[in-house]
Image (tube, helix red, strand yellow):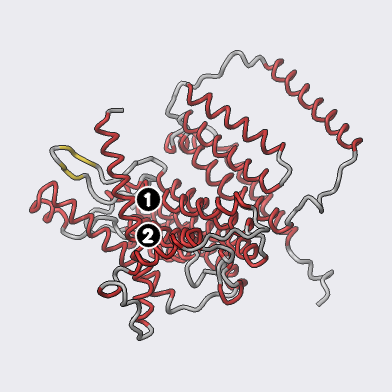
Amino acid sequence: MEAAFLIEKILLVVVLFVITLTIAAYSTWAERKVAAWMQDRVGPNRAGIFGLLQPLADGGKMFFKEEIIPSGANKWLFIAGPSLALLTSFLGSAVIPFGQSIELFGKTVPLQVTDINVGILYIFGVVSLGVYGIMIGGWASNNKYSLMGAIRGASQNISYEIAMGLSIIALLLVTNTLSFKELAEQQHSWHWNIIYQPLGFLIFLVCAFAETNRVPFDLPECETELIGGYNTEYSAFKMGAYMFAEYINMFVSSAVMVTLYFGGYNYPFMDQVNALLGPTWGPLVGVSVMFLKIILFIFFFMWVRWTVPRFRYDQLMDLGWKVLIPLAIANIVITAIVITVVDKL
Amino acid sequence: MSLFYLVAFLSILFSLLVIFTKNPVYSVLYLIATFFTFTIHYILLNAQFLAIVNFIVYMGAIMVLFLFVLMLMNLNKDTEPMKSNLLKIAGVIAGGTLLVTLVSSIKALQTSAVATTTNSQIGLVGNLGKVLFREFLLPFEISSILLLSAMVGAVLLAKKDKRTQNG
């Protein structure tokens, strides 16, 4: 392993880390602005112009608040919960390609931290780990509301993982690859997977909402029933870690959905643009297209939050087991039949 | 090689901690750590598919269910039934007998002749799929039917019986 390779990867990781943190921080601002806009209010406008310094002010507040660990709580697991939630939320972005290989200072640099040949399964594994932060934190708080939130989180996560996996299987039948790099390259210019897998995308989208615990599936924290759910006992930066983890999860799942179904960094007429701008600036246009798509998805997450009311718990389970799983299985069967027929023709 | 010894040491350490901790939730958390070290072992053996499936199924699903059940029951030291000394001695004898049986059977099998695979790339997804669906198709399908029947059985057990249920 040469030093240049290591430096290149470390730089890429650091840049990705900073971008993820920035997007997560400004998602908190955007969420409040979007909410204000939808409810005909002004929203945060005191810190900086348009309230743009609000995330910094909030972060400062989180750092300087008093840390309270309840006396009945399990101290180590109480700290481990939010740490784990934050850690697992970052892991997913390692396999996502954010652009074509770019030429920098006479070197070709791939804009992906690592291209493992089981990339999609890796994302799936990271998603399934995400629930531990909620479960451990909720249990360690030694509070009935927290425990209820943790248990709801676990059962919801397991239920929707199945439908999510089944919707990915149908996609794999079309693409024949598990590597995100190949997946992105296959969707060159306008050949996006959403054209071949509209139903699969819809199932995946609903499951992504459930896995990130966003409204209408935010039952683990459901403040009208459970006060704050799994984070009832948390204060100061541990509370902030949980909130941040949710926004990072939203960013990563948006990036995954963009790469799986909406062509990643691809856009129509990209060959002409690349020929015009050369090997350095051409891919950068692709990167900005990718981030534009991700931001649109994050906006969609917020739009749904301020439009759709929360599900009841039995409705959530019914939707997962009785609607999404049969639909996903039907999707697999139909996709397989269509592929076989098309191949025979 | 040193990486292997480090990971092997960690697996053994965590599996011992699973047994020796008093709190059942800690036990499950150590078991998760043990499975994580197993995942690293699979990656070291170049079996990436097995590694990631172990990660998803054992760490991501089965252990979440374990934790879920433990949290629902909320086992504490006060509610845990105290075992009598007679039971403990019986457990030690049974465990020791199992150990002796295992050791003797391994000795009888003569594992000194290590099975070597000709293809070191067998653990990658594409190769593994081809092997499973060409050479081992029948065992693969039979095991899938086994899993299906187990699932149907579980659903049947969980289903409410309409005749015995009042109202």
Pointer 1 and pointer 2: residues touching (CB < 8 Å)? Answer: yes
Location of the N terminus of chain A by quadrant is top left
Q: Chain of mark 1?
A: A
Residue picked out by circle 1: A93
User: For numbered disc 1, what is the local secondary structure?
Assistant: helix
* Outermost residue toward the left in this view: A276
Residue drawn 31% across the image and 52% down it: A18
Q: Label 2 lies in what chain?
A: A
**Badge 1, how many Cα within 10 Å: few under 14, some, many 20+?**
many
Residue at 31%, 62% in the rendered image: A294
Q: Which residue is mark 2?
A: A251
Q: Is residue A187 left or right of residue A61?
A: left
Does B18 appear above or below B100?
below
Sequence order check: which comes first, mark 1 or mark 2?
Answer: 1
Up-down relation of residue B122 to residue A124 (above or below): above
- The amino acid at mark 1 is Ser
Type of the residue with mark 2: Phe
Residue A186 location (% of width, % of height)? 28, 50
Provide the secondary structure element on which disc 2 rests.
helix
Is residue A204 something that shows in the picture? no
Residue B131 or residue A76, whichever sits in front: A76
Residue B22 x, y percent position in the rendering: 74, 43
* Residue A67 visible from this viewpoint: yes
Residue A330: give x, y in percent of width and height.
50, 62
